[in-house]
Amino acid sequence: MPAIKKINKEDIVKACMEIIRAEGIQSINARRVAKELGCSTQPIYYIYSNINEMKADALKGISILFDEAMLRSNYDKPAYKDIGRNYIQFAKDEPVFFKILFSSEMHEKAYAFLDITGPSKAIYETISSQTGLSEEDAKAFHLKMWLYVNGIANLVANDTCSFTDEEIDKLLGEQYISMLLFEINRGNIDKQVLDNANKNRLIMKGDLYNERQT
């Protein structure tokens, strides 16, 4: 007699996320999740007293996936530009998840992304370390940048426009430089920060050129 597969909460959440990714959150119900897991509905009702609790955990799972994606980097700590790029990449790779996270029903996620005491604290610390801005000024800087990045991400998630990685890098780089100039004129940032940013952009362009030649 084959062993009965033991279903736990993590299995259910993963199954819900797969269903949401493929069919949308409206397809979440006990029978559909049981089919995805290859089991009866009994373990699902044993773990969850109602479907809304199950959906809430699935949304938390999506939120965690998003937070992890934002701080992904090839280095010890992500550069601020990496965060913007990761944000747009998430919208490109996971359009359904992205639209759910920033929908009217999940508006608290948008606030969390801008909350200086919440998950975005690491982002503000990144801005402060790169620019010398105070935490509060870093929050204002991030809000302006987020409005720009979120616009691109929504175009990508809704398949309204498509951008190459190179085009995204150019858009984000130009916007970042423009915002640095604004803060320099206000006396909040030293000009050396802009010089370093321009120097890094030239290095990156050189790397891209070398990659094309190999």
Image (cartoon, rainbow, N blue to C red):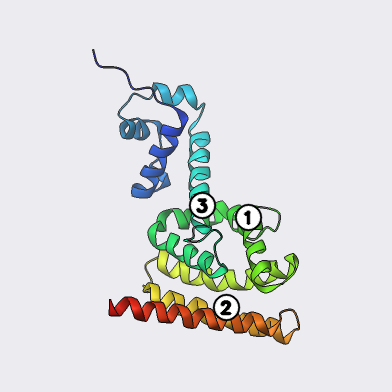
Amino acid type assigned to the residue bearing label 3 in the image: Glu
Mark 3, residue position? 68
CB atoms at circles 3 and 2 under 8 Å apart? Answer: no
Taking the spot 44% from the left edge, 27% from the top edge, the residue there is 8
- Label 1: element kind: helix
Q: Would you place residue 21 above or below residue 6 in this image?
A: below
Taking the spot 57% from the left edge, 68% from the top edge, the residue there is 80
Assign the N terminus to one quadrant of the image: top left
Which mark sits nearer the N-terminus, 1 or 3?
3
What is the residue that sits farthest to the top in this orientation? 1
Q: Would you place residue 95 above or below residue 133 in this image?
A: above
Crowdedness of circle 1 by 10 Å Cα count: few (<14), some, many (20+)?
A: some
* CA–CA distance in space, label 1 to label 3: 14 Å
Percent position of residue 34, x then y: 35, 30
Mark on residue 176? 2
Q: Nearer the viewer, residue 101 or 133?
A: 133
Taking the spot 52% from the left edge, 47% from the top edge, the residue there is 64
What is the residue that sits farthest to the left in this orientation? 1
**Image side of residue 129 versus residue 168, left or right:** right
Percent position of residue 108, x then y: 61, 53
Amino acid type assigned to the residue bearing label 2 in the image: Tyr
Amino acid type assigned to the residue bearing label 1 in the image: Ala
- Label 2: element kind: helix
Which mark sits nearer the N-terminus, 1 or 2?
1
Q: Would you place residue 123 above or below residue 52 in this image?
A: below
Mark 1, residue position? 112
Taking the spot 37% from the left edge, 67% from the top edge, the residue there is 159
Quadrant of res 16 = top left
- Label 3: element kind: helix
Percent position of residue 195, x then y: 61, 84
